[in-house]
Amino acid sequence: MTFAVTILAQDAAPAAGSMPGWFMPGKGLLAITLVIVAAAVMLSILWARSGRPIRIRKIAGLDAVDEAVGRATEMGRPVLFIPGIQDVDNIQTVAGITILGKVAKTAAEYDAEIEVPTTRSLVMTTAREAVHAAYMTAGRSDSYNPDRIYYVSDEQFAFVAYAGGLMQRKRPAACFYFGCFFAESLILAENGNSIGAIQVAGTAETTQLPFFVASCDYTLIGEEFFAASAYLSGEPDQLGTLLGQDLVKGVAWAAVLVAAVLATAAALTGHAGLAAFVDGARAALGGG
Amino acid sequence: MAVVLASLVGLVMVLTAFVRPLEFLGTAVVDWFNVLAAIAFVLGGANLLKMNLMKISARDAGWGYAAITVGAFLVTIGVGLLKVGAHPDPLHPDVALSGDKEAVGGAFWWLYEYAMSPITSTLFALLAFYVASAAFRAFRAKNTAAILLLGTAFIVLLGRVYVGVLLTSWIPADNAWVSWLRLENLSGIIMGVFNNAGTRAMMIGIAIGIAATSLKILVGLDRSYLGSGD
């Protein structure tokens, strides 16, 4: 507790802080937030492990995976999965690869062909590992074809040109876009829409979400995208992390509400102490 | 072993953000990743050649594009490696390959400037048409929510063009009770208050989601990225 108070004081006035030299100045609040998030998630995992039930709301986009892959199987067309256009050092790519594993398992069970073009060779290697594991889990390792997971180009629009051409030629019945996308999101999704594919997308790029919402059948918005792996696995450990996220969200919601009330009260009453407190809190949070 | 390694490295990377003596590791690991990615690029290049040569050999649909891809790939690599058209470095005029391959006037520069850049710009420009077709679908007034979306989009679009500003220019700008009704102000309120609030709510959820996902990877709960299945 003393440590937490000390680092918060240093955040507010770095020069006057009495923190040991090894701690980065101005990172106190971030460190405390990190500890709270980690504690909430870990406690929730323990809660879930103890066997207590955890209710999770339906995510239509993820429930549609079976339907989309099944449709592709019936139509004899491939399933297209694009894990974003960033490298494996991007958390969205990692989350996308996790979902790829689940989609590939369903494809293996249905004996549908899955095609994964990538923009980075390291993503290609990682995706191959995930898909291979999924085929083995489904007991269909003989059907696994590494040549269906391949590298195209690091260049954003070169990749889009290839993916667009692939969609028009092979006409996949189901298209999945899970990862980090930029301007290419709309070109990909509109191409998929034009060929009548069932499309499911998920990204944490808020600027691209409207494009996916407009062109795809289902879109996983922000946090839903990161919750997907837990939702699809159904394991208590994984579901526990969702409970932890909700707890932290509740804390954030309460903090926003209190801050809004205090800032409004400071503005309306002109109380100097309240205004100083609000300004201090804003400065500690890195606000302008 | 891979999980332990991933957890250990991940934990150290988290600490680099807070512990000053470990700060150098943050940049060092990024350098290591870049070296690894550069080596992996050879793997990617080899895979690109293999896939396209297979397509040409099998005369698959679109094999002509594959032939162009292979040709462009080899020409670009050849031009870059041999520094075609690049003048030797003034400090080493006798060494033929001492010049900068990307120097203005060189073949590599020419390829980027007159092939790569226009093609990229063309593809980017296509976005305008895709936006139009997506907007046409999204803004169809088929229910209450769609009508609200259409109305809001209409106000925001009009508030950002001269004709929109002109339409409500008769509303006095200096009267605080009515000036917000001017389209440029209404558009600003929608973007700055409603849109901003929604975006920030999403950003908070995303940040918490990223933290939880990272934690799952750090403690080895999520190993699917290593190919370990469920």
Image (cartoon, rainbow, N blue to C red):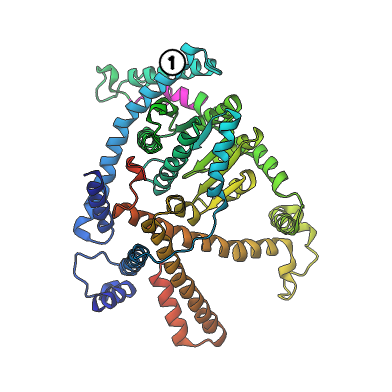
Report the number of discs. Answer: 1
Q: Chain of mark 1?
A: B
Q: Is A50 in the magenta? A: no
Residue A203 x %, y %: 50, 48
Q: Would you identify the image quadrant in which residue A164 lies?
A: top right
Segment tinted magenta in the rendering: B100-114
Asked whether residue A145 appears in the rendered view, the answer is no
Secondary structure, mark 1, is helix
Q: Is B104 in the magenta? A: yes
Which residue is at 28% across, 57% downward?
A: B14
Structural crowding at the residue carrying mark 1, measured as other residues with C-alpha within 10 Å and reported as few (<14), some (14–19) or many (≥20): some
**Above-or-below relation of B83 to B157:** above
**Above-or-below relation of A145 to A250:** above
Tell me the quarter of the image containing the N terminus of chain A: bottom left
> Which residue in the protein does label 1 denote?
B53
The residue nearer to you, when weighing A72 against B186, is A72
Residue B76 x %, y %: 41, 20
Please, what is the three-letter code of the amino acid marked with disc 1?
Leu
The residue nearer to you, when weighing A114 against B134, is A114
The residue nearer to you, when weighing B123 against B145, is B145
Q: Would you identify the image quadrant in which residue B49 lies?
A: top left
Asked whether residue A269 appears in the rendered view, the answer is yes
Residue B65 x %, y %: 53, 18
**Above-or-below relation of A47 to A83:** below
Residue B183 horizontal side relative to residue B42, left or right: right
Which residue is at 50% across, 34% downward?
A: A110
Residue B197 x %, y %: 56, 65
Q: Would you identify the image quadrant in which residue A52 lies?
A: bottom left
